[in-house]
């Protein structure tokens, strides 16, 4: 990129019903998390929608995606770990509840 005029929209991923708070990606997938309480997975090469991951009771504030593991934190005071199996089947592994006093 040499100047701002070199920037152009190539694709737009549509699907969340609230603000997208965070994205992460690797060579295979783009993973997005939103205030709509969902995580969406998109194919990196085609930008096609793959799957919605549900579970949080409130908006998702942070997300990290590495080596087929998605870790997300929410305003519902939980951290969720989701592991992909063969990059197709998503399985909820564990939910931790943190109580702060």
Image: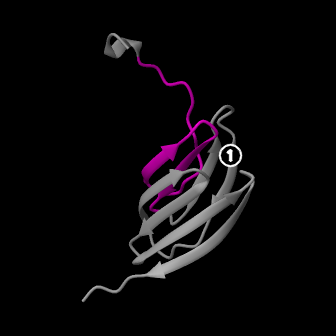
Q: Nearer the viewer, residue 1 or 14?
A: 1
Residue 46 position by quadrant: top right
Q: Is residue 90 left or right of residue 32?
A: right
Q: Residue at x 55, y 49 (%)?
A: 31
Residue furthest to the left: 101
Residue 99 position by quadrant: bottom left
Up/down of 89 relative to 45, above or below: below
Q: Position of residue 75 (x, y in %)?
A: 38, 72
Split into 4 quadrants, where in the image is the C terminus? bottom left
Residue furthest to the front: 67
Residue furthest to the bottom: 101
Up/down of 21 relative to 36, above or below: above
Q: Residue at x 63, y 36 (%)?
A: 44
Q: Nearer the viewer, residue 53 or 70?
A: 70
Which region shows up in magenta? 7-35
Q: Position of residue 32 (x, y in %)?
A: 52, 51
- What is the crowding at mark 1: few (fewer than 14 residues within 10 Å), some, or many (at least 20)? some
- Label 1 element class: strand
Q: Residue at x 43, y 67 (%)?
A: 73
Up/down of 67 relative to 95, above or below: above
Q: Residue at x 43, y 51 (%)?
A: 22
Residue 89 inside the magenta-drawn segment? no
Split into 4 quadrants, where in the image is the N terminus? top left
Total marks placed: 1
Residue 9 inside the magenta-drawn segment? yes
Q: Is residue 32 left or right of residue 90?
A: left
Residue 100 position by quadrant: bottom left
Residue to which mark 1 is pinned = 49
């Amino acid at each position: 990129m040499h100047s701002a005029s070199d920037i152009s929209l190539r694709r737009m991923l549509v699907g969340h019903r609230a603000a997208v708070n965070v994205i992460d990606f690797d060579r295979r997938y783009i993973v997005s998390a939103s205030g709509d309480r969902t995580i969406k997975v998109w194919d990196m090469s085609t930008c096609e929608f793959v799957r919605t991951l549900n579970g949080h009771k409130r908006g998702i504030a942070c997300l990290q995606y590495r080596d087929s593991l998605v870790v997300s934190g929410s305003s519902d005071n939980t951290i969720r770990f989701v592991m992909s199996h063969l990059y197709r089947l998503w399985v909820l592994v564990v939910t931790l509840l943190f109580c702060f006093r």
